[in-house]
Amino acid sequence: MGSDVLFQVMRYDPRRDVEPYWAEYPVAVDDGDTVLMGLMRIREDIDGSLAFRASCRSGICGSDGMVINGRSRLACKTQVAAVVSDRGRVVLEPLRNLRYVKDLVVDQTPFWQKFRRVEPYLMPEEPRSAAERPMVLPQAEFDRLSKASDCIFCEICYSECPINGVDRGFLGPQALIKAFRFEFDPRDDGAAARYAPLSNVEGAWRCRTTFNCTDSCPKGIPITEGIQRLKRKLVGELLSGMQPAYRTPMPVESPEETSS
């Protein structure tokens, strides 16, 4: 094994702990080792009670999002050598803006609730025959939407969004980029169904264009750009008289669901 790196991990078990605390683990790390590999060594060789999520280990499943040295990242894509401090430390915390469940695991319920609110699927107008309904996207349309389709639901953009941190009702960048993906699909006719949650004061207009989501996305999705295009589309629909101006705030989850 290589040199030792001190993993400083935020621990919290609501069954026994009054509040979160820091635990430190020296881990032997080789060149090319990822943060996830270090966590697995801790759980297998030092402390089997450490809780974190992981699945594919390849940056595809999005399970192992966490805050690494102050920034939300995928542990499986982050090499220890790239983040270790001058003091030989790697500091790990759970994702922000979601309630702690245990250690590095958070409650994903609000994230999925907001995702479902934007009706994230194609809604073709009915009745339409198969011949009238386009099944294959033209290349130009595919290129425009392909990056938005790369989302792996890792919640990193949600964790890095400052608006999610102060407004629990905000849909968040992931739900909005998914709405963009379907709103701009020529095969979709669901604009009317999505208009209320998207044009709401807790929808697209709550975004403050900080670019945190775009900067942190492990798949390189231009999330902020997609949200701005979504805003322009909503304005066009409003000016055309297609939809009324919705101003009723969206329901906010209970403190038990959202507090961290």
Image: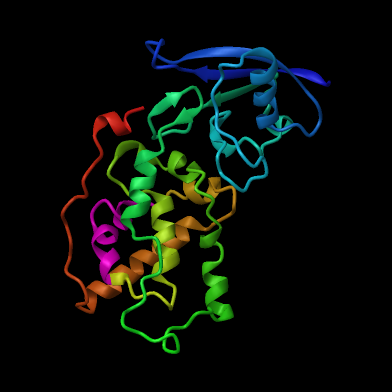
Name the quadrant of the C terminus: top left
Q: Is residue 248 left or right of residue 74?
A: left
Magenta residue check for 129: no
Find residue 173 and report its horizontal and vertical position in percent: 41, 51
Q: Is residue 74 above or below residue 80?
A: below
The magenta segment is 192-208
Q: Main secondary structure of the magenta part?
A: helix
Q: Is residue 121 left or right of residue 254?
A: right
Q: Residue furthest bottom?
A: 131
In percent of the image, x 66 and y 37: which residue is there?
Answer: 78
Q: Is residue 60 above or below residue 50?
A: below
Find residue 127 and report its horizontal and vertical position in percent: 31, 83
Find residue 194 and report its horizontal and vertical position in percent: 29, 64
In percent of the image, x 50 and y 42: which residue is there?
Answer: 156
Nearest the eye: 97 or 13: 13
Nearest the eye: 243 or 59: 59
In percent of the image, x 34 and y 64: which residue is there?
Answer: 231
